[in-house]
Image: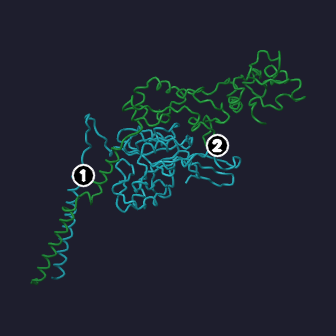
Chain colours: A green, B cyan
Amino acid sequence: MRIPEQVNRLAIVIGVLAALTLVTRFVLIPRSLVSTDLHWAAATQREAIKPVKFAGSTACQDCHEDVALKKAKSFHRALSCEGCHAPAARHADDPTAVKPPAPRDRKFCPVCHAYDPSRPTGFPQINPTAHNPLKPCVSCHNPHDPVPPKVPRECAACHGQIERSKAVSSHALVACTTCHKAPEQHRRSPRSALPSKPETRDFCATCHGQGTAAAGAPKEAPKVDVAAHGGRNLCWECHYPHLPEGRL
Amino acid sequence: MNKREFLKGAIVFFPAGGALAALARQAMGKETGSAPAKDANGKKGYDPASHFYGMGVDIDKCIGCNRCAVACKAENDVPDEPFYFRTWVERYTIARDGEVVVENISLGARETTTQDAREIIRTFFVPKLCNHCQNPPCVQVCPVNATFTTADGAVIVDAERCIGCRYCIQACPYGARYLHPTTKTADKCTFCYHRLVKGLQPACVEVCPTQARIFGDLKSRASRLVRFRRLNKIHVLKPQLNTEPKVYYANLDGEVR
């Protein structure tokens, strides 16, 4: 069979067009336009060379070993230095020129430690308006080794709620045993032997009475005339001893 | 031309085209595939193929201090306006009558929830971020291939290629993307990719005070994330969408969406 001349010519034209298309696609158009690999690699590289702002706690330890050792044994051991002291990569590069800030006002610690019902149970929380107002946190708590207020462990183990309200009250430094005498058996079998409670108005008067009755008491304890104040009621019927400032 | 010759020609022509395409692919592969480079110290460079990153979040440990969102903004130059986030923290409040209130606490200082405290039965914080899905909807919809998954498992955006069409922002079921107001391109969490390649942790994980966020390499048996996945009951967000997220939540409440 003979192929007509015009078909041959048409085949040549189609062949040239096809060759041109292939050359344009694979030679003339740069690879970066058609291959995702190349521009993805370039984008990944651009992302990888962005500057770091947080140096990381290991960088801090190299110079501030004393603080790092202290913090490693404290309740704040899991905290990153830069969580409080702000990103410090520039300080790590040039320690003398750039100094990281140290937050010392009362606004900062409550970011974590203010009471919030959504926070997990057991996380140490305070009410910032009632907890020693106007005093900066660092005057009582060292942020590198924070210690919770001390009460006799034996009582706090069960009476945690009382412990927490007493710790923020003006009775914070009054030991549980000042007012309650707990028999040894109370620790083993709490309900079989109850601790004592002050039963007379004279007991509170040892600090809050006027004149000789409160001779050895701290000066800042508010004084009342016990005989005239409150009629026949016992003190605790109006004042809650674990949080005397609080309203019942 | 009869039928026999036409078929003969076709049989020769089509495989030849396939072979040409294969040759072209091979040539390209030679250009891109290269061994990990060594840096100036002679230390072996970062090899993305030997890592596969993910994150773990323990809901029971989150105290909602928002340090992660603040650190992320500082590290990644996220705009300061309170509604641009790469990571953020939500407060879930579930009331007695079953009503669920979700608040983004990273939006601003709201001290406590607005609901009546006696009506609340559960309340907790949920840190959120890009889930770096293994089957990411945002990558599927991008018309210009500007967003992609790196070999080490981070979904990132090529800001030079992004045309700002916002398809990916719409496609993300987790709301993890936003349009950057100055570059007008999509922006999102990169797992702090620039920190990973230097062996550092993402900024949010670095500053988390309660270790609620765990970061690690799923390919390494010794990584903290693998341990986290072994020791906790793990759930992911919106598993029904088959996005296969790589952000794993422990102690996740059923109400979290």
Residues at marks 2 and 1, CA–CA distance in whole angstroms: 54 Å
Residue that extends furthest to the right in the rendered view of this protein: A232
Residue B77 or A171: which is nearer the viewer?
B77
Q: Which residue is mark 2?
A: A117
Spot occupied by residue B41 in the image (x, y as percentages of width and height):
26, 34
Residue type (three-letter) at the residue carrying disc 1 = Thr
Spot occupied by residue A218 in the image (x, y as percentages of width and height):
74, 19
Q: Chain of mark 2?
A: A
Q: Residues within 10 Å of mark 2 (few under 14, many from 20)?
A: some
Determine which quarter of the picture holds residue A155: top right
Spot occupied by residue B17 in the image (x, y as percentages of width and height):
20, 67
Image position of A60 (left or right of B94): left
Residue A86 or B19: which is nearer the viewer?
A86
Image position of B83 (left or right of A206): left
Q: Is residue A37 above or below residue A194?
A: below
Camera-near label (2 vs 1) is 2
Residue A240 or A231: which is nearer the viewer?
A231
Q: Chain of mark 1?
A: B
Image position of A157 (left or right of A241): left
Residues indicated by labels 2 and 1 sit on the same polypeptide chain: no
Residue at figure coordinates x 65%, y 32% from the top left: A133
Q: Which residue is mark 1?
A: B32
Q: Residues within 10 Å of mark 1 (few under 14, many from 20)?
A: few
In which quadrant will I find the N terminus of chain A? bottom left
Q: Is residue B186 above or below residue B109?
A: below
Residue at figure coordinates x 47%, y 25% from the top left: A67
Spot occupied by residue A10 in the image (x, y as percentages of width and height):
14, 79
In which quadrant will I find the C terminus of chain A? top right
Image position of A163 (left or right of B195): right
Residue at figure coordinates x 53%, y 43% from the top left: B66
